[in-house]
Amino acid sequence: MNPRSASRRSSSAIPKLVLASRSPQRRAILEQLGVDFEVVDPQVEEIRSAESPRVLVEENARRKAAAAAGELVLGVDTVVVLDGRIIGKPGDGSQAREHLEALSGREHEVWSGICLSGQVSHAVTRVRFNPLLDEDLDWYLATGEWRERAGGYAIQGKGAALVAEIAGDYWNVVGLPVAELNRMAPGLIRNCQGLQG
Amino acid sequence: MNPRSASRRSSSAIPKLVLASRSPQRRAILEQLGVDFEVVDPQVEEIRSAESPRVLVEENARRKAAAAAGELVLGVDTVVVLDGRIIGKPGDGSQAREHLEALSGREHEVWSGICLSGQVSHAVTRVRFNPLLDEDLDWYLATGEWRERAGGYAIQGKGAALVAEIAGDYWNVVGLPVAELNRMAPGLIRNCQGLQG
């Protein structure tokens, strides 16, 4: 590569992506994609209820993105929805068991709101759980993986063993709707590659 | 834990799982699930064609499992199928480009055959690709990730950016149909946990 092209590359017009999220899962997905980004922990008051899951996650994504400075800020909010009701992060093991018992053998939805530089959208993925025996619940609760997870499970971890099938964007269930990000900003991923990308 | 229960645990009736596969992806999934297993590289002649993808992947899974010694042997074979035609591992970058151009903007199927201790089954997941521009192909081919991958992409890597949505078992697309394994042998995953599991 000659010096001119190297220089053009480093002075690219695309500002560095800022991820306004505490979530290690979202960080891991952007790293997997080779995206060069920085992380800001957004200090925001999130809303807990709204007239629909879509309104809730889009509003929270907007608030997170608005709390971080930058030209290219990404805010995301993800919830688990069963029968129209939001299943939050369990407060303790017994609540985690209740959540997983409610999800057992049934289909639920995972909704994410996504806000990129002020533009807002959402994604929804349907997830069907295996019917879970008491032994399955005992095993999964003992992993501790339910902590800090919407719905009380991590599909990208041992929670993979709880899931029968999904329909939609898998990465949305992990916490970042990659396909929707691609629709909102085509080429963003390939243009935000780190030097090792 | 008293010595008696420790001893009962180590003399468990479940033999150690043997994975008859070279695939690092299959190993990674079993590790993620906390399964204690060993790996054998099966030296087998795989069939390249059959009357259907199901017959092909089930026969190859059976051959791989039969090539390894053990009481609990797992053999798996995975192919990408577009319009009924098998899209293999690309031999070079230009063939990888052809494969990805064929998959661009369309839906294909990922079939796995699975053989566990002589019992044979299969799983199929539908995958829809984003419409890919030349720049997308240039970017993805430059990652080198297409090498040794059925269909020329890795959904668990940067290939995540190529995918619009899936329907079925995500892990099947990576290379191990976890949900089907659970159906064939309920409790296998929780009963094959390593000491750190």
Image (cartoon, coloured by chain):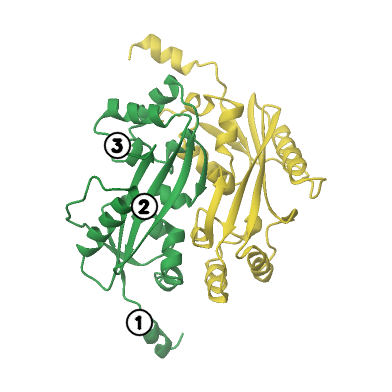
Chain colours: A yellow, B green
Which residue is drawn at the image coordinates 43% and 44% (left, top)? B156
**Are tags 1 and 2 found on a single chain?**
yes
**Are tags 2 and 3 found on a single chain?**
yes
Q: Is the residue B119 above or below the residue A177 in the image?
A: below
The label number, if any, that marks residue B69 in the structure image: none
Q: Position of residue B159 (x, y in %)?
A: 43, 36
Q: Secondary structure at mark 3?
A: loop
The amino acid marked with disc number 2 is Ser
Subunit of mark 1? Answer: B
Which residue is drawn at the image coordinates 64% and 23% (left, top)? A71
The label number, if any, that marks residue B112 in the structure image: 2
Asked where in the image residue A90 lies, by quadrant, the reply is bottom right
- How far apart are the two marked residues, 3 and 1, measured between alpha carbons? 40 Å
Q: Is the residue A163 above or below the residue A38 in the image?
A: below
Asked where in the image residue A13 lies, by quadrant, the reply is top right
Question: In the image, A183: left or right of A55?
Answer: left
Which label's residue is closer to the chain start, 1 or 2? 1
The label number, if any, that marks residue B13 in the structure image: 1
Which label's residue is closer to the chain start, 2 or 3? 2
**Are tags 3 and 1 found on a single chain?**
yes
Q: Position of residue B76 (x, y in %)?
A: 32, 56
**Mark 3, residue position:** B147
